[in-house]
Amino acid sequence: MASVSSQPQFRYTQPPSKVLHLRNLPWECAEEELIELGKPFGKVVNTKCNVGANRNQAFIEFADLNQAIAMITFYASSSEPAQVRGKTVYLQYSNRQEIVNNKTAADVAGNVLLVTIEGADARLVSIDVLHLVFSAFGFVHKITTFEKTAGFQALVQFSDAETATSAKSALDGRSIPRYLLPEHVGPCTLRITYSGHTDLSVKFQSHRSRDYTNPYLPVAPSAIDGSSQFTVGLDGKKLEPESNVLLASIENMQYAVTLDVLHMVFSAFGTVQKIAMFDKNGGVQALIQYPDVQTAVVAKEALEGHCIYDGGFCKLHISYSRHTDLSIKVNNDRSRDYTIPNVPMVNAQPSILGQQPVPAVTPTQQYAGPQFAPAEQGVMPQPSAGWGSTVPAVPQSMPGQMLSHPYMPPPGTVPPQIGPGMMQLPSQGSLPPQTMVAPYRPDQMQ
DNA sequence: AGCACA
C-alpha cells in the first residue's frame, strides 16, 4: 500500500480556503486581535470569534485566497509561531470556503442579558443572589428566571447596552463567588449572551421574576397562598415569607444605634413608614415598615450582615417580620410613625405594636436618644439635632447610590473609622472589604 | 490543539 494512505488526517489534508481556522486562542479573543494577526497578509473581510465549546477557536476570512495561503505558508516556515497575547495560535485552512455569520441576538449588544447558570445546583441560585451579582455593574431593572433545555436561565435587564456589556464581560464564564452560596451548593458558572429583548414583561413579583423599577407590582398569587407561602432558600430550607416589615437585630452594638440612625439607613431603599425599637435577648431589635414588600426585599438583601459602623460594630441581621402594619401608639425615641406627622410625643413608654404582643422592653435603657420635636412639616421629621444639615436628602429611587454618603454619628457617640464606605452597595466604585460583591476580580474567580 | 447554528 502506498504511504499516502497513512498520512495524517489533519494539517496536510485541508485544501486551501480563504477562510482560516484558528485554535488555542486566548480567552475571549476579540475580533480586533484576529484582524491584527491577519492584516500583514491581506485584507480580513470577516471573522468569527469564540467558536467551540471552549470558545477558544475562531475563523478569519481573507478577501483573497492567496492572502490566506500567504499566511499559512509564512507560519509554516516561521520560527515564531502565530501568537495572540503571547499565546501560540494554531492555523489551518478551514474546511469551509466562507464564514457564515449568523449574527443572532446573542451577538448584538443590548441592554438585556441572557444568563445560563451552569452546575448541578444551578437551580438553588436565588433570584436575589443574581440580583446582587448583577447589581455590581449598575441598576438592574428586571430579572426573570426560567427553565429551558439549556438549563436554568435568567434574563437580566439593565438600563443600557453599555452597562449590560460591562456585566457580561466581567461575569461571562465566571462562577458565582462561593461566599454568596451555601456551603453544600456546588459551583455555579455563568454563561452570558445578549438577549434580543429590550424590555422584560414582569407581571408579578415572585421567586421567579422581579421588577425592581416597580415596587408596587402585585406579588404573585402563588407567592401568597398557602402552598408556596414559603420560598425555598439557597440551603433548601423554608424561609420566612417576604414581608414589607423587616426585623433587624443589631449585633455587637458598641455604639448607640438610634431610631434616627435606623431611619436613615433604611430610608436609602424607600420610604420608611414606621420603626419600632425594642430590647430582646439582651440585644436591640427593630421593626422597620416599608409600604411594600419589594422595597423591604431590596433593603434586606442589601443590608443583611453589614455593619453600621466600621470595625464590625453594630452588625445588622435582618429577617422578615410577620407584621404587615405596625401600630405605633406614640412617637418617642424608640418608636416612630413617619406617616402621621403629629402623633403624641411621649418619652416614657415604648411603642405598642400591632397584632403581636410587644417584645419585652426593659426600661433601663442607656441609649439616650436625642430629643425629638414633633414633626411639623407634615411629612417626615427632620433628623435630630446631632445630624443636622450634614445629612443629605435621601432619594428614593436608586438604592444603588444611597449609602455612599458619609454618616455623621450622633455627638458623643462617635465611633472610630465611621465612613462612607460602610454598607455601601455593590454598584459603587470604592468597595469596602466587607461589601459582598467587592472581590469581583477575574483572577480570583474560577 | 482539530471546524461555527436557530
Image (cartoon, rainbow, N blue to C red):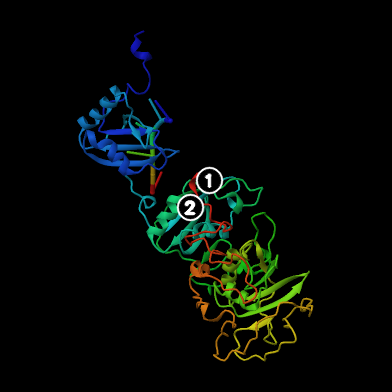
Relative side of A106 to A262, left or right:
left
Circles 2, 1 touching at the beta carbon (< 8 Å) = no
Relative side of A312 to A11, left or right:
right
Identified by mark 2, the residue type is Val
Packing grade of label 1 (10 A; few <14, some 14-19, many >=20) is few
- Indicate whether A343 appears above or below A391: below
Residue designated by label 2: A115
Q: Label 2 to label 1, Cα distance in Å?
A: 21 Å
Residue A112, how many percent across, how many down? 42, 58
Residue A283, how many percent across, how many down? 75, 69
- Quadrant position of the N terminus of chain A in the picture: top left
Callout 2: chain: A
Q: Earlier in the sequence, mark 2 or mark 1?
A: 2
Query: Which residue is painted at 26% across and 27% down in the image?
Result: A16
Which one is in front, A130 or A300? A300
Which label was assigned to residue A444? 1
Callout 1: chain: A
